[in-house]
Image: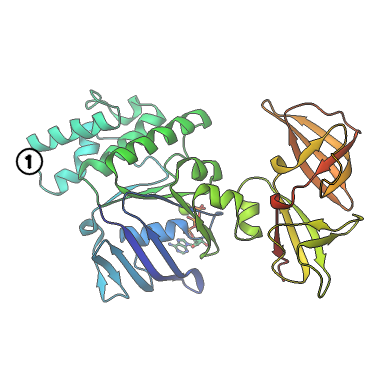
């Protein structure tokens, strides 16, 4: 299966610049996810790959095959051989499952007999074997989504492009669909670009994630890298929950010691803050250690806080605590009473220091 390389992709709608010289590389067989807030350009990127609208500039190649190059090359969508599934089910209500799935083969003038064989084959693949004769309204939402996927796979695609394919499913079905799609994708080994604005979906399914913001790439990495080593505050904030403290490194001072208003001692951070001056310190709730009976001597970054509010969330408790001028979210497995004074440890390697945004 070919990989995907995009260089310098730019696209504007009128004077709204949506993609700014975007670079992207999805490896052969990889499930590569575009993640970012609404309007950041995920669908625009996917549509450019599929050839559904021309970018203004840039180059797109599937393996060695260039499908777009600054408008000198612009292979039409039907020749790009992408399997595409969009947000809405996009199955035709008036066609049976068989005819929905077989449609791309019919377009390619595949004989009726061969078509039926292949349709049966891909329906097996998406675990809908035997449902050829049903109409979409006789299927559940999850099944309709799998019909759309079967159609995308009917003519073996070079690239699979999925744009929020699960957004119409309820939470439980979505979770099952993720597991199931991931297994299928690995089995057929097709290079896949997956678009979502759902961080859980991105973290649980992807080989790598590209976090986008307003048409630019913020970070590319494995789910673990993105979660544990977010490149900047935007990424930290977009993925999961993060506490952010305002800090300051005095000129000429050790950048691994960051002063926070309302705290006596500076916080030790590792790695050190990138620069002197204003800093933003990000720490995930689950990395904060609660010491119910006080922290051992010589533990760095020990602070005393007051519990402001408590919430029980089934598999954990969530607290809002007051630290100096800041509120922090803390998670624990055991209950702590409201109003209690608590000793917390903020491990230096759990704190990521970013330059304050100008
Ligand atoms: N055909 C179009 N004409 C004009 N503007 C468009 C068009 N398509 C998209 N846009 C604009 O381009 C920007 C990016 O849109 P895009 O659909 O790529 O975002 P997205 O990241 O997929 O968002 P979402 O998560 O909401 O689907 C938005 O500001 C949008 O309004
Ligand atoms: Mg979109």
Position of residue 113 in the picture relative to residue 126 (left or right) = left
Answer whether residue 148 is visible to the viewer in this image.
no
Residue at x-position 70% and y-position 57%: 270
Position of residue 306 in the picture relative to residue 242 (left or right) = right
Residue 111 coordinates in the image, percent (x, y)? 7, 41
Q: Is mark 1 within 8 Å of ligand 2?
A: no
Residue 199 coordinates in the image, percent (x, y)? 55, 45
Reading the image, the residue beneath label 1 is 111
**What secondary structure is found at the residue carrying circle 1?**
loop
Residue at x-position 46% and y-position 57%: 42
Residue 44 sits in quarter: bottom left
Choose between 211 and 134: the one closer to the eye: 211
Residue at x-position 73% and y-position 36%: 331
Q: Quadrant of the C terminus?
A: bottom right
Choose between 167 and 285: the one closer to the eye: 285
Position of residue 269 in the picture relative to residue 103 (left or right) = right
Residue at x-position 82% and y-position 70%: 253
């Amino acid at each position: 299966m070919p990989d995907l390389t995009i260089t310098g992709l730019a696209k504007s709608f009128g004077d709204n610049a949506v993609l700014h010289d975007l670079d992207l590389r999805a490896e052969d067989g990889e499930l590569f996810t575009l993640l970012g807030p609404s309007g950041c350009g995920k669908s625009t990127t996917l549509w450019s790959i599929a050839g559904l609208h021309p970018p203004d500039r840039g180059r797109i190649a599937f393996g060695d095959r260039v499908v777009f190059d600054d408008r000198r090359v612009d292979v039409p969508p039907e020749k790009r051989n992408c399997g595409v599934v969009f947000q809405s089910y996009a199955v035709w209500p008036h066609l049976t499952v068989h005819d929905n799935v077989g449609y791309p083969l019919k377009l390619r003038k595949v004989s009726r007999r061969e078509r039926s064989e292949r349709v049966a084959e891909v329906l097996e693949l998406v675990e809908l074997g035997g449902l050829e004769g049903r109409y979409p309204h006789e299927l559940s939402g999850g099944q309709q989504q799998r019909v759309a996927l079967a159609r995308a796979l009917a003519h073996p695609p070079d690239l699979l492009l999925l744009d929020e394919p699960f957004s119409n499913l309820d939470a439980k079905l979505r979770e099952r669909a993720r597991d199931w799609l991931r297994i299928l994708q690995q089995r057929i080994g097709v290079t896949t670009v997956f678009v979502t604005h759902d961080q859980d979906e991105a973290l649980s399914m992807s080989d790598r994630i590209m976090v986008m913001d307003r048409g630019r790439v913020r970070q590319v990495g494995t789910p673990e890298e993105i979660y544990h080593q977010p490149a900047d505050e935007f990424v930290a904030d977009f993925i999961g929950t993060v506490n952010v403290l305002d800090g300051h490194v005095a000129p000429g001072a050790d950048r691994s010691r960051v002063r926070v208003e309302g705290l006596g001692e500076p916080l030790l951070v590792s790695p050190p803050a990138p620069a002197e001056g204003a800093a933003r310190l990000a720490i995930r709730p689950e990395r904060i250690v609660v010491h119910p009976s006080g922290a051992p001597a010589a533990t760095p970054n020990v602070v005393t806080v007051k519990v402001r509010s408590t919430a029980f969330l089934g598999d954990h408790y969530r607290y809002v605590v007051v630290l100096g001028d800041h509120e922090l979210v803390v998670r624990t497995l055991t209950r702590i009473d409201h109003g209690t004074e608590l000793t917390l440890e903020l491990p230096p390697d759990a704190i990521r220091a970013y330059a304050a945004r100008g």
